[in-house]
Image (cartoon, rainbow, N blue to C red):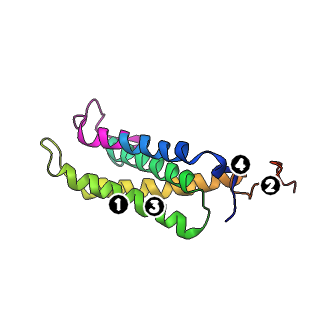
Amino acid sequence: MIDYRVSRLPAPIRWGLVTLVAGVILYSSLIEPPGAGLAPAGPFGLVGLDKWLHALAYGTLAAALAVALARDALAALVLVVCLAVGYGIGIELVQATVPERSASALDAAADACGALAGVAGWRALARRARLLEPARADGERRVD
């Protein structure tokens, strides 16, 4: 197994971040009243602000999952997207049973778009910052 720089963060910290992000999403999705102070239209007026917030939330969750897994393999990144989207779909199903809430396929689609963008952004940033380079035993970076 390759020890990537990002995996040198203790696992409890990496997974604690995932738990924190997932908890904030759960709270915002089930407990906070719908549309609490939101403008009806989001940036560019194409979709509602709530869809942008869904994408941002699930992009953050996917990035946190990618950091927690600390793997650059395509299969790991696909797993991250599937986990984030699955969490979003699960919350949508629970919302269908909560008064003043409803399930929405468009929310799930925004979750999926956010998860994809989050993984792509994390991967690009991690490569740029060389977090995905195999760590050397002496802690030094490879010089190109």
| Residue bearing the label numbered 1 | 86
- Name which of mark 1 and mark 2 comes first in the sequence: 1
**Tag shown at residue 136:** 2
The answer, for residue 45, to whether it is visible in the render is no
Q: Distance between the residues labelled 2 and 4?
A: 15 Å
**Residue reaching furthest bottom?**
75
Q: Distance between the residues labelled 1 and 2?
A: 36 Å
Nearer the viewer's eye, disc 1 or disc 2? 2
Q: Residue at x 58, y 52 (%)?
A: 122
Q: How far apart are marks 3 and 2 (CA)?
A: 29 Å
**Tag shown at residue 81:** 3
Tag 2 secondary structure:
loop
Where is residue 86? Give x, y as percent: 35, 60
Where is residue 90? Give x, y as percent: 28, 56
Q: Relative to residue 100, is residue 116 drawn left or right?
A: right
Tag 3 secondary structure:
helix
Tag 4 secondary structure:
loop
Over which residues does the magenta segment extend? 24-44
| Residue bearing the label numbered 4 | 129
